[in-house]
Amino acid sequence: MSKNKTNQPSSPKNVPTLSEAISGNSSDFEKTLAFIREIVETFAIAFILAFLFRTFEGELYGIPTGSMAPTLMGRHKDFCCPECGYQYQVSASEEFNANTNTFTGSYVVGGTCPQCRYTAYIGDNNPQQKKYPSFRGDNILVNKYTLNFRQPQRWEPTVFHYPGDPQTCYIKRVVGLKNETIQLHNGNVYIKKTDDADFQIARKNSQQLLSMLQMVHCNDFVPQKHLEAGFPTRWHTDSQLILNSEQQETQTLKILHQNEIPQTDSNGWQTKDHASFQSVSTPDVSWLNYRHCVPTIEDWNQYKLGTFAQSHRIIPPQLITDFTAYNTSISSDNLKVKDGVLFPKEYALGVNWVRDLAVECELTSKKPQGAVILEIVGGGVAFDCLLDLENGTATFSIPGHNEFQQMSIDTPIQGVGTWRILFASIDDELRLFVNAKEIELPEHSGFYNLPAERDPTIRDLTPAAIGVRNAEVEVKHLTVKRDIYYIATDGGYNREVDRTHQLVVSNEILLREVMSNPTKWKRFGETVCVEWTLEQGQYFAMGDNTAQSQDSRLWSRVSPYPPYYVPQKNLVGHAIFVHWPHGNPIPGTELNVIPNVGKIRFIH
């Protein structure tokens, strides 16, 4: 759409005007009144809430940018991927200058799906023949009262006056508290208090962990047409590949990179549509393995031309990175086109390897027997959770590492039934959730005596797996997620360019060549380590969208060069509730005033 072009709102479809309703039948009139009443009631409730919160030490704020995405949305566009149907958001902050309250003249015309990695064009005359409006950011309620008697808590989303401009309010998570030294390393946050000798990793509570997990892949969004065209499925019903020698590793890598996964008659998994998997009872463990096979723009170009299979293009598995769909917006003044296909900006690639992962599924047990094993691999080390369906226990282990004391705990997963399960290896700790409730584990669930600087190995090309033994189960909604990767930088870069391997890539092909080849992973675990020391009344703040957040890591390098900390006097309050996400449009118009109830939520 041209920047000078304006769109006049049209009349809502199937909604009569007031005069038409009065002169027409009573049912139309009643529908119109109900529609008007719903809008009036919504605005009335919003006004009353605003008044009450303002009165009782609360205040309303709008989110202008995406530094806290996807937890909180700034100005953005909603996408529904035309290829796989996954719904996601991309930033539209560049369209509007929040400081001058004016439009920039640029507009977002594309974004990349985090599921299938298809880059969709949504500008004028787009193939979907749809309009993609830009929505204002979330509106939130901020509790200013609690800070009168306590300091901010770690990981708490907090509003504060930016030290470089007290007239401007920011919202970030407080990750560093007073009298602490903060260290960023391997994507994690480490803390050392004044009297401590060593750094300790900063861990999240249950609500924080679940809300901060980032989507990697959900198997509900795998169209059959992609598989028929030659795209590899992410979950494979092959036997797990045990690597004991360099020769086996070389052969395994060759098999993986040729997408020729061997199928065995003894394997206990079966599938019809790759959306759900059923097991048959076998005495040996049968594995269902995830591999991160990510199509590139070139792959999609061949797919659209119908020549993907004929060209024998290979999509090898690669390491999981900190790719964030929200950052893939393509603006009209930075348009990259090749053979009619859009290319995302360089910063959207996600170049940092992430080893803190979680696997989630819906598990249905059909017989009260056997066991299910959830496995996550990080830095060449496997972390297992064995669920015994007969007695309901979960046993956690790190095969090959006797320093980790194996432990068992009771769970509700027993006999015949269906459960939603999430197993995570995050912040150097094992976590298990059943039906969104965390199972409390013993204190020694941390990875003691495992080196923090672990390089990835070929095993990281199968970073998640589900095994069965003597069990008849069905798994659905298979999902892989990752933790937020906090980029260790203090110089304004969105990648750790000081890392020993000097990973700097300019396109997806080069990135895949690096992330799919173990010979290039030497010293990947030795990432940049950056530290900041806080004194009394000083706090360290970072955004969830760590690659696109102007936060404490960067302030001292950006004019007017404020300090890297938030002074206590600048704190406003902690964000507690999204009371008004962007509204839905009135049918047939571009008036986004219908309450978006599904996105009203508490903030964790």
Image: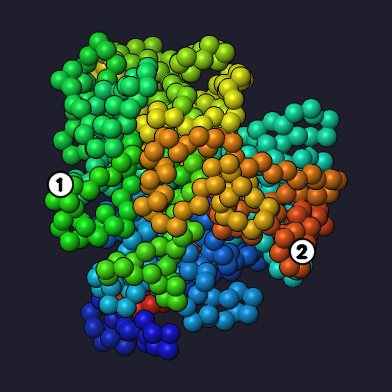
Which residue lies most toward the right here? 536
- Residue type pointed to by label 2: Tyr
Q: For marks 2 and 1, give the CA distance.
A: 55 Å
Q: Is residue 401 above or below residue 381?
A: above
Where's residue 277, x and y in %? 23, 31
User: How dense is the environment of label 2, judged by Cα within 10 Å: few (below 14), some, or many (20 and up)?
Assistant: few
Please tell me which residue lies in front, 29 or 114: 114
Q: Which mark is residue 572?
A: none
Comparing 129 with 250, the one in front is: 250
State the image coordinates of residue 431 (x, y, percent, origin top left). Answer: 51, 28
The answer to whether 507 appears left or right of 600 in the picture is left
Residue drawn at point x = 84 percent, y = 45 percent: 535
Q: Quadrant of the N terminus?
A: bottom left
Residue 257 in view in this figure? yes
Percent x, y of residue 44: 54, 69
Residue nearest the viewer, comparing 406 with 351:
351
> Which of the numbered marks, if any, corresponds to residue 561?
2
Query: Where does residue 149 sit, x and y in percent of width and height?
Result: 80, 46
Whether residue 287 is situated above or below residue 36 in the rendered picture: above
- At 48% from the left edge and 64% from the top edge, which residue is drawn? 91
Res. 228 mark: 1
Quadrant in the picture for residue 388: top left
Question: Compared with residue 230, is residue 121 higher up or lower down, i.e. above or below?
Answer: below
Name the residue located 43 percent from the left edge and 21 percent from the top edge: 385
* Disc 2, SS: loop
Disc 1 residue crowd, few under 14, some 14–19, many 20+, Cα 10 Å: few
